[in-house]
Image: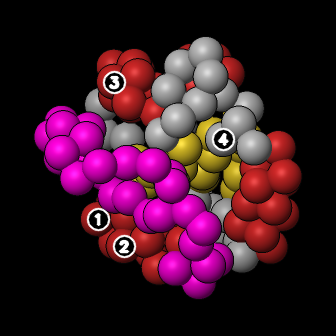
Amino acid sequence: MATKTRLLVADDDPTLLSLLRKTLTREGFDVETARNGEEALDILRNHSSFDLLITDVRMPVKNGEELLRDARKLCPGLKVVFITGYCEMDERSRMCSHGDCEFIAKPFKIPDLLEVIERSQTALR
């Protein structure tokens, strides 16, 4: 039996976080959620076996860029998908200069997010 892809989703919008947990779980993923970057790091410290981090760029406590930097220290090969409504191209380039990551703009459609996740999974193989 194949293991489920483990996703960690971090976003400060509780409605979106709940929707993503339900939807991605229904799609067959093993999903953990965090309300901010610091909470996501705590989860990674205790359970570092995630395949993909999906995170908002703008969050209180620790933003997506800080989360990426710290998460990669704990899990060097961790793939990242940023979900954001506010991110300039130069910011995207800087954030992804350290390895594999993708962006998807809010608001997004679930099939579009699933496509990005699939691309990330393909890169994992």
Q: Mark 3 points at which residue?
A: 69
Q: In this view, does 66 lie to the left or right of 38?
A: left
Answer few, some or many: residues within 10 Å of disc 2's Cα (few below 14, many 20 plus, some between 14 and 19). Answer: few
Q: Name the residue under label 2.
A: 119
Verify whether residue 29 appears in magenta. no
Q: Earlier in the sequence, mark 3 or mark 4?
A: 4
Q: In which quarter of the image is residue 37?
A: top right
* Residue under the image location 60 percent in, 67 percent down: 107
Secondary structure at badge 4 equals loop
| Mark 4–mark 2 CB contact (< 8 Å) | no
In front of the other: 19 or 90: 90
Label at residue 12: none
From mark 3 to mark 4, how far is it between C-alphas?
Answer: 17 Å
Q: Earlier in the sequence, mark 3 or mark 1?
A: 3
Q: Give the range drawn in magenta.
A: 84-112
Q: In which quarter of the image is the N terminus?
A: bottom right
* Residue under the image location 76 percent in, 55 percent down: 16
